[in-house]
Image (cartoon, rainbow, N blue to C red):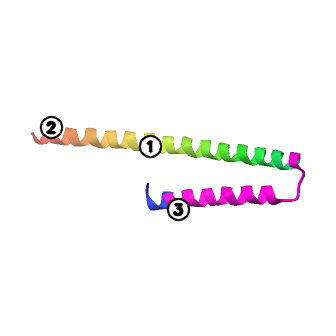
């Protein structure tokens, strides 16, 4: 994993832990706290799902670009042969 990805991962984990601690220590009724945790959890899942989808799309694009470059190189090699 690259350094930037590690930093972003650590930042995300830290933010989630801080948010969870803040929610659990806030002076609210238990039902309100559970509802808030549920909402925040749903948002986190949605964000992670979106990030994974974006990553898959980027990987797909990279794969296609790589395949095109290999095809182009093969054509040049055959032309030189």
Residue 81 image position (x, y, % from top left)? 9, 39
Please give the name of the residue rendered at 52% of the width and 62% of the height, measured from the top-left corner: 7
Viewed as shown, does residue 33 lie left or right of 74? Answer: right
Q: Residue at x 40, y 44 (%)?
A: 62
Q: Residues within 10 Å of mark 3 (few under 14, many from 20)?
A: few
The majority secondary structure of the magenta stretch comes to helix
Assess disc 2: are there few (<14), some (14-19) or many (≥20) residues with their C-alpha within 10 Å of its C-alpha.
Answer: few
Residue at 55% x, 41% y is: 53
**Front one among 31 and 69:** 31
Task: Pick whichever of labels 1 and 2 is earlier in the sequence.
Answer: 1
- Name the residue that disc number 3 marks: 7
Report the quarter where the N terminus lies.
Answer: bottom left
Q: Earlier in the sequence, mark 2 or mark 3?
A: 3
Residue 24 appears at what percent x and percent y? 79, 55
Instruction: Reply yes or no: does residue 44 show up in magenta.
Output: no
The quadrant in which residue 31 appears is top right
Magenta residues, as a range?
6-31
Which circle, 2 or 3, is nearer the viewer?
3
Number of numbered discs visible in the structure rendering:
3
Describe the element under mark 3 as helix, strand or loop: helix
Q: Which mark is residue 23?
A: none
Q: What residue sits right under mark 2 in the picture?
A: 78
The quadrant in which residue 2 appears is: bottom left
Q: Which residue is mark 1?
A: 59
């Amino acid at each position: 994993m690259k350094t930037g990805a590690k930093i972003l991962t650590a930042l995300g984990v830290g933010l989630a832990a801080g948010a969870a601690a803040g929610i659990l220590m806030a002076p609210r009724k238990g039902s309100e706290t559970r509802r808030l945790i549920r909402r925040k959890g749903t948002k986190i899942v949605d964000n992670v799902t979106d990030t994974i989808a974006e990553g898959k799309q980027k990987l797909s694009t990279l794969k296609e670009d790589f395949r095109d470059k290999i095809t182009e190189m093969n054509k040049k090699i055959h032309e030189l042969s």
